[in-house]
Amino acid sequence: MDSRSKVVFGLAELFGGPGGLALGAKTARVLNGNTEYVVEPVWANDIHNDSCKTYVRNIHPNNPDAVVCCPVQDLKMQQIPEVDVVGFGFPCNDFSVVGEQKGVNGEYGSLYTYGVKVIKAKNPKWFIAENVTGIQSANSGTVFLKILNDLRESGIGYNITAHLYKFEEYGIPQYRHRIVIVGIRRDLNLQYRVPKPTTPTKYISARHALEVPPIPKNALNNELTKQSKSVIERLKFIPPGQNAWYEGIPKELRLNVKRAKLSQIYRRLDPNKPAYTITGSGGGGTHGYHWRENRALTNRERARLQTFPDDFYFEGSKESVRRQIGMAVPPKAAKTIIEAVLKTFAGIDYEWVEAKLSNGRNVRQIKLPNFLNNHN
């Protein structure tokens, strides 16, 4: 007879996408003596219909009502259950260094406030928020300070830890850098610490991710993209790790582009290194390209590089699936971070590193301007 007890943290998620964070949460497990600490996704919201269908299929197959598909602005607080954890990877479009970095002045910049509203209303034991590194510099850096302050003072207050994670240092076969903010309710007297990198010098390569084991030809979401003859010819002259600006490309196959030469255009993977960042949108030449075969990656290959298992099925068209994969949190990264939170609650020591941002500073070293403190 199993005498093990279980501590379950219920998770509600805004901007849930296809469920990368939720999958990482579901697979996180920590055992302290006879007590097991786990996270159970119980509710989620997203605006993208295919993402909601994907979330239901893989996370809540027996409870489709657990996913509410609508703009976050239309949610009523009573629709959100009382939970222990709030997760939100609020849309990053206005903070990405690839875009115009409109910050809070953009269409998506102020959406983080809905996460703050839920935290204030529900007072969860902890929360986890994720965004691109560009959030630190948007609006001359004031946006990030405002977000940190709002999260710190939400509800009855939170001890927050913000860190620039380089996911390739945590076993993710992809150079993907993200700011993750973890907050634990202040009255619980706990402080989350950043888990020590597991692969700080020995990264998982793209080749290993895609070939060990090989992807079955009949795998889910594994359709090939039809490549034009000119693209195939151009790729023949691009070595692994290089892009469309490689000098060895014949003049007749070079791109006639006068603007900035983006490094990811027709860039092949380097099989001996992690993939470059998998994105969810972009025109011709931005789909990610195989190092050996003259073609774009399939969605299943992209999903592998994001650490989704092969049986995780994405709903929607090929381009919709590409969007979902590129915007998702890698489940393996989410699991690593969430297991460190569970260890914090379980009182289990683990190896950790000092939390740092792009400028090398710790959040506790950041002094908020007076005008931010006066506008909470």
Image (cartoon, grey):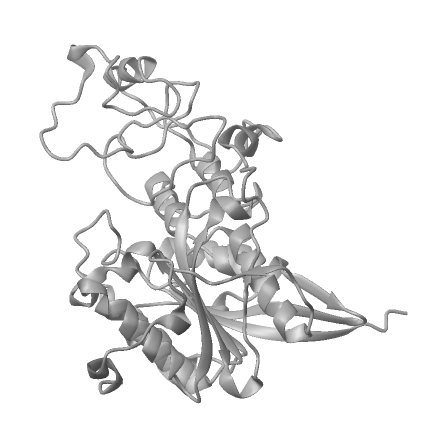
The C terminus sits in image quarter: bottom left
Whether residue 48 is visible: yes
**Camera-side residue: 338 or 301?**
338
Q: Is residue 202 left or right of residue 269?
A: right
**Camera-side residue: 229 or 162?**
162
The N terminus sits in image quarter: bottom right
Residue with the most extreme left position? 258
Report the residue at 43% width, 26% height from top: 270
Residue 207 screen position, x and y as percent? 52, 28
As drawn, 370 above or below 34: below
* Res 282 → quadrant: top left
Whether residue 107 is visible: no
Residue 259 screen position, x and y as percent? 11, 34
Report the residue at 19% width, 14% height from top: 253
Residue 13 screen position, x and y as percent? 45, 69
Residue 345 screen position, x and y as percent? 63, 75
Report the residue at 62% width, 31% height from top: 213
* Res 165 → quadrant: bottom left
* Res 245 → quadrant: top left
Count the marks.
0
